[in-house]
Amino acid sequence: MSTFDIRALADDYGQQCMDPVLGLPSVKTLLAKLNLELVLHRTTVEGLDGLIVPYGDFGVVFINEAQPARRRLWTMAHECGHWLLHREIIDQGGFIKSYQREREAHEFAAHFLLPEALIHQWWPDSPWVDVLASRFKVSIDAMVRRLLELGLPIQFSSDWEAPAH
């Protein structure tokens, strides 16, 4: 599927799953719409943030609860992207991680959680990475990447403090 098609699919589902109170696409609504059950679990497997498993007519999305909340939200959207884009492979039980499929699921998550129209709508009132990341409930890193993709400047509010390392 082309990048354009993935973006259009994410935008379409974003509109269908819009939370009228928050004014944001809802991942939980998306999970329900796709007939996916969410299971939070704790794993010791390094790098395993999420996993999707088919089960008859529905699927189960396992999310590592050790992740920060914003990362869990991103991972849920990412796994939904796999379900929509790679269902045939998932249903065959032969899903092997590939760079291309991971990139496609990532693209879906970015466009579902951070719709271009909403970013442009909210940008004039709060053009700061940290404020927008908080509003969209995503990480600073995810917001920076999306703003760069949209050609918007990267700036932080005067209240923001970089995390200590």
Image (cartoon, rainbow, N blue to C red):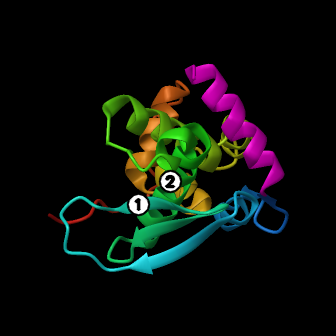
Real-space Cα separation, disc 2 to disc 1, in angstroms: 7 Å
Q: Quadrant of the C terminus?
A: bottom left
In-image side of 165 versus 31 (left or right): left
Q: Residue furthest left?
A: 165
Residue at (48% x, 33% y) in the render: 104
In-image side of 48 versus 78 (left or right): left
Q: Determine whether the residue tagged by mark 2 lies in a helix, strand or loop.
A: helix
Tag on residue 16? none
In-image side of 34 versus 147 (left or right): right
Q: Which residue is mark 2?
A: 79
Q: Which residue is mark 1?
A: 51
Which span of residues is magenta-colored?
A: 1-17
Which sits in the foreground, 43 or 52?
A: 52
- Residue 164 % position (x, y): 19, 66
Quarter residue 2 falls in: top right
Answer with mark 2 or mark 1, whichever residue precedes in sequence.
1
Residue at (32% x, 76% y) in the render: 66
Residue at (82% x, 51% y) in the render: 16
Q: Amino acid at mark 1?
A: Leu
Contact between marks 2 and 1 (CB within 8 A): the answer is yes
Which sits in the foreground, 47 or 68?
A: 47
Q: Image height check: is 16 above or below 1?
A: below
- Residue 7 % position (x, y): 64, 30
Quarter residue 30 falls in: bottom right
